[in-house]
Image (cartoon, helix red, strand yellow):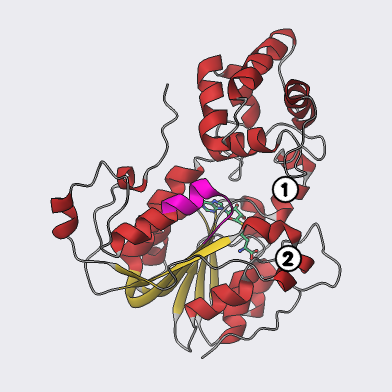
Amino acid sequence: MTARRGRRGATPTEPDTTRHIPVLLSEVIESLSPSDGDVFIDATFGAGGYSRALLNAADCRVIAIDRDPSAIAGAQSLCAEFPGRLTVSKAPFSELDAITEEQGCDRVDGVMLDIGVSSMQLNQPQRGFSFQSDGPLDMRMSRKGRTAADVVNGMDEEKLARILYVLGEERRSRAIARAIVKARADAPLETTRALADVVSRVLGGRKEDGRHPATRTFQALRIYVNDELDELAKGLSAAERCLKPGGRLVVVTFHSLEDRIVKRFLTARAGKEVRGSRHLPDQSLKSKLPSFRIVNPRPLTPSKGELEVNPRARSARARVGVRTEAPPWPAEEADLGLPSIET
Ligand SMILES: C[S@@+](CC[C@H](N)C(=O)[O-])C[C@H]1O[C@@H](n2cnc3c(N)ncnc32)[C@H](O)[C@@H]1O
């Protein structure tokens, strides 16, 4: 059965900045190709745009996961709309196979991962993800653990610079780290505005591609605080373990660090050589049978029409793999080229 293109409550004529507009929605649903009786994992529930579209497209079941307690609280009305067909769990998606088992399911027909933050998280100043408005420097999706303020005020200069360079691809990482350490000696940087001002002063208000000078610094801290790349690597392996033969994996990413990990994962698992991998000797590749088939060699990207409605989708990329009969590979995150921030 093909997916319905219509989506209730998800296509406002004016972009709604508070509600998350699902990215590459029709491409994701078509790639999953839902049929009656199927079971899917929506590992990044957010505002439930993908889950809703799947539940509308076929008489299927969705096991949804999000680590953000606000996303879970917001899911209750959708659960009530589709009784017995949607369950929502608060967990990191690295545990998606354990959650699936808890839900009484052995293998599933599809897994989707829509990596990054939702518009609700970005647009609430008190969550501390955005430099566009002032709020506490928090950035924790799960609301647990170390905040961005803890990192910025507690970490040594060299490691801070490394985080900005590796996870934000910020060329002026050293100068920014130096300025942060100098500023925090006067008073701790507790707010998004305080940090954005320090970065702007270093970069002289320079905008890159029309983006705020603090964009890369905020991206780096967010990825670090939420351990996003490690979560992605573990989530991909967990998906591999719980997909049935013929099951689909769809991953939407928003920047090159994430897309590279997904590409390397699927390329290796499809039995193709991963260029530049020093960690996977040829012999090891030969001894493993391909556990995925790649559907599109090039990632899917948003159409012009989608970008007009939702400019935030501009850097989105979706990669799709189909699970084979082969056993899952051992999880070897090193093969995915995860960058090291150790100094
Ligand atoms: C881009 S939004 C997903 C939006 C969703 N596809 C929709 O249509 O509304 C990403 C969501 O994934 C969640 N998330 C990100 N990383 C996660 C992780 N490692 N484990 C669980 N949830 C995660 C975030 O809290 C956020 O709600």
- Toward the viewer: 144 or 121? 121
Q: Which residue is mark 1?
A: 122
- Toward the viewer: 99 or 188? 188
Q: Which residues are magenta?
A: 252-261
Mark 1 is on which residue type? Leu
- Toward the viewer: 102 or 321? 321
> Percent position (x, y) of residue 69?
62, 51
Task: Classify the position of the C terminus by image quarter.
Answer: top left
What residue is rendered at 45% in x and 51% in y?
A: 260
Q: Is residue 328 left or right of residue 317?
A: left
Q: Which residue is mark 2?
A: 307
Q: Quadrant of ligand 1?
A: bottom right
Specify the label residue 260 is tagged with. Answer: none
Mark 2 is on which residue type? Leu
What residue is rendered at 45% in x and 86% in y?
A: 37
Q: Is residue 214 left or right of residue 205?
A: left
Task: Examine the rendered structure and indicate whether residue 76 appears above or below residue 142.
Answer: below
Confirm whether the magenta stretch covers residue 258.
yes
> Percent position (x, y) of residue 286?
15, 59
